Image: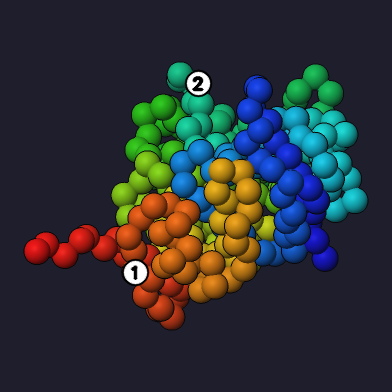
Amino acid sequence: MSVLECRGLGVRRGEAQVVHDLDLVVDAGAWVAVVGPNGAGKTSLLHGIAALTPVTGHLRLGSDDPHQLSRRALARRVALMAQQPVVPTGMTVRELVALGRTPFLRRFGTESATDRAAVQHELTRLGLATLADRPADRLSGGELQRVMLARALCQQPTLLLLDEPTSALDIGHQQSVLDLVDEQRHERGLTVLAAMHDLTLAAQYADRMVLLDRGVLVQDGPPAAVLDARQLNETYGARVDVLPRPAGPAVIPVRPVSR
């Protein structure tokens, strides 16, 4: 069963067309990595799906057009982890995670026992309980990414959109955050669509990869099929080797041999 269907999808940013005539179907429970060079349209695609940017063409979440859903209804189905999250000064970790319950709040915005329990569950599940009363703007990068994941999971979405979730993290925190996402995907039946910069990490976690180049889909398939050295050279203008590994292909930059 498909969670997301795009047919002939186009996305504009001001006067510029940044995604062109894109066809993409994502099945329930999949992890699809969207990769491509800077300016390829990865973030714009996620924003279009999340109804933050106008689109043209056919776009469906299940049987619904996300641009026709109310913000509350959409937020119960789709959660977006932004690349550079905005953290209000002085807001505690618990308060920031609780923002994920906004689509479920009763009239006049009062929290219920169910909302409080959902927040505590995510804090505990993601190892954040001891940080609950700490100001969120004083966290490390890895801690903040876990907090933003907890906030997204509080929305109880079926589709989780990740925009470069590990771009500011060291390799240990990159693995920690992606492991958490993968655990939650399997435990909750989440579907993940992630714009990812690191091709090797993307190949290790995603079932499928979509390669964009200047807003056009140029490859779509399993990581081993998409990560072809010749294709990556053409798309990125990079010299690389692609090494097969059990967890997924590894993309290695190659320096020219000195004469």
Image quadrant occupied by the N terminus: bottom right
| Element carrying mark 2 | loop
The colour style of the image is rainbow
Residue 59 image position (x, y, % from top left): 81, 45
As drawn, 218 above or below 141: below
Query: What secondary structure is found at the residue carrying circle 1?
Result: strand
- Viewed as shown, does residue 100 lie left or right of 106? left
Q: Report whether 6 appears left or right of 172.
A: right
Residue situated in front as seen by the camera: 118 or 54: 54
Disc 1: which residue: 241
Looking at the image, can residue 98 be seen?
Answer: yes
Camera-nearest label, 2 or 1: 1
- Residue in view at x 41 percent, y 78 percent: 244
From the top left corner, tell me how far across and down residue 181 is, in percent. Answer: 54, 56
Residue beneath disc 2: 88
Which quarter of the figure has residue 20? top right
Position of 107 with respect to 51 (left or right) is right
First in sequence: mark 2 or mark 1?
2
